[in-house]
Amino acid sequence: MADFLPSGIQLAYLVAVGLFIVGLKQMSSPATARQGNILGSVGMLLAVVATLIDQHVLSYTMTAIGLAIGSLLGAWVAYAVAMTDMPQMVGFLNGLGGLSSALVAVGEYWRLTNSGATIDPIVNISILLSILIGNVTFTGSMVAFAKLQGIMPGTPLKFRGQQWVNSALVAGFVLGSGWLLFHTDPAVFLGINAIALVVGVLLVIPIGGGDMPVVISLLNSFSGLAGSAAGFVVMNNMLIVAGALVGASGLILTQIMCKAMNRSLLSVLFSGFGSGETIVSADGSAIQGTIRQVDAEEAAMMMGYARSVVIVPGYGMAVAQAQHAVREMAEILERLGVEVKYAIHPVAGRMPGHMNVLLAEANVPYSQLYDMEDINPQFPYVDVALVIGANDVVNPSARTAVDSPIYGMPILEVDRAKQTIVIKRGMSKGFAGVENELFFKEKTVMLFGSAREMITQVANALKQL
Amino acid sequence: MENIISALFVFVLASFAGFEIINKVPPTLHTPLMSGSNAISGISVIGAILVASSSENTTLATILGLIAVICATINVVGGFLVTDRMLQMFKKKES
């Protein structure tokens, strides 16, 4: 029996890994995604149960207390959170994952130090890596959470010599790690922990709201890598594989987000967009044309008598919580015989797929949502494009103005539609801090006001048609 | 040494598998994918259990392990449940 147990546990881990992989695979289609998520959770349960029968588990009290408290709190946050707050929720959970990986490494270091044995250099390196990635993930995610939740200002926070401070901290970590490879020194160990925590904070504070999709994806990837590193510490394949899967998935999303903004990861991390100082003024005065303003009744008339309307939601819609009002308006339009589609830019919102979740919450069927590549060729045939609280992702100067900071960024080509209605609170600039020539075009009309109020007014006016 | 090499093999191969599996996820599912994979990254709960239960006595290591178990479990349970809540909402058009 004693010989059978370890291989039994390893086999259970193997099955769990299989469930993770199949589950993630099923996440690629809306029809099977829910089942995929359930498979993943079954895999996790199996892995936990298998671990509990491990002979290294000597005491169940601590584990039982931890699992009970964690499950209760986890279930509570999962049901309490609003769908608009999804980005900060993911950030928060990410941070906890990172913290737990770091703590595993710290606990293991403590145990090994107290056992008096010299620590194997490879284990030591794994511990140090695990601490670095885990702590950076923890504080980085918590700063992202605070920014998204509005606890901290969402604008980039920069100070003079930030790069130097960062370099000094990294150098300190490397030196401390080098020392620890040859000496058992709890004080230095605590020191490098603190450094890693500070690095996480400094990594995320210079990053502004519109770049959050990139950062959230990157931290997601980190949380996986932290798990893998912890796996190297306790030499457990289950952790290594699951962590690697998450690390890869986060990295893919990071890449997709960077591409959607036409920026490299390095420029997102180290040259804060919208910080005011790095931005070359895109020569706002050069934009020719006048603003044409309409009221809700006029906008309703334009859309009510159109054949096709494409709705372009942006972060402004999320802030105004206007998704339900938008869906109601779209239903009235459809009753009037108008074909309604939604065009989603990959970086609309504060995390990958943010708009899709909000519209799904408002009962918009996903078959009505179109990706950028699919909808762009259709815009010339669209009667009205309705832009709700989006700015940079529909700015046509991304195609033409070579000196603009957003030049080359793929956009939703709403300016090619026959008419464009833009709902916006005022004439403020978007996240990138550049003027939007779309607002000055002849085919564009502006509807100023809060998204929810305006949409409701348009819907009421549509009912009168 | 052999241990670490085979662990590295596992890590690299799993990363490639991850890239292949996730490459074709449509944008609609990016948020659920992220929160779902986030839940999976809570796998560190296993390492945490091993640390928390490594001794009959309460030592600093077991206390750290306990905190790690709590954090990772919130990550796992919260992540899977919120993903399920989200995916429930994704519907085809009711005809």
Image (cartoon, rainbow, N blue to C red):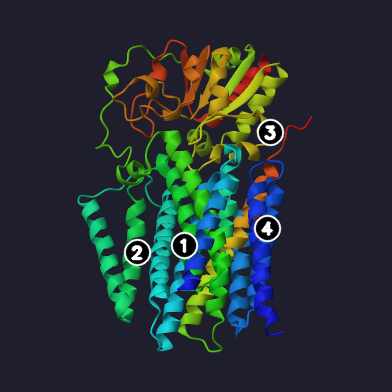
Residue kind at label 2, given as amino acid type: Ala
Name the foreground residue: A247 vs A158: A247
Of all chains, the one bearing label 2 is A
Residues at badges 2 and 1 in contact (C-beta under 8 Å)? no
Q: Position of residue A398 (x, y in %)?
A: 38, 24
> In percent of the image, x 54 and y 41: which residue is there?
A354
In this rendering, do the residues under marks 3 and 1 share a single chain? yes
Packing grade of label 2 (10 A; few <14, some 14-19, many >=20) is many
Of all chains, the one bearing label 3 is A
Viewer-nearest of discs 2 and 3: 2
Quarter residue A195 falls in: bottom left
Q: Is residue B89 left or right of residue A200?
A: right
User: Alpha-carbon distance for marks 3 and 4?
Assistant: 28 Å
Of all chains, the one bearing label 1 is A
Quarter residue A438 falls in: top left
Viewer-nearest of discs 3 and 1: 1
Q: Secondary structure at mark 1?
A: helix
The residue singled out by tag 4 in the image is: A19
User: Alpha-carbon distance for marks 4 and 2?
Assistant: 33 Å
Q: Position of residue A385 (x, y in %)?
A: 54, 19
In this rendering, do the residues under marks 1 and 4 share a single chain? yes
In this rendering, do the residues under marks 2 and 3 share a single chain? yes
User: Alpha-carbon distance for marks 2 and 3?
Assistant: 44 Å
In this rendering, do the residues under marks 3 and 4 share a single chain? yes
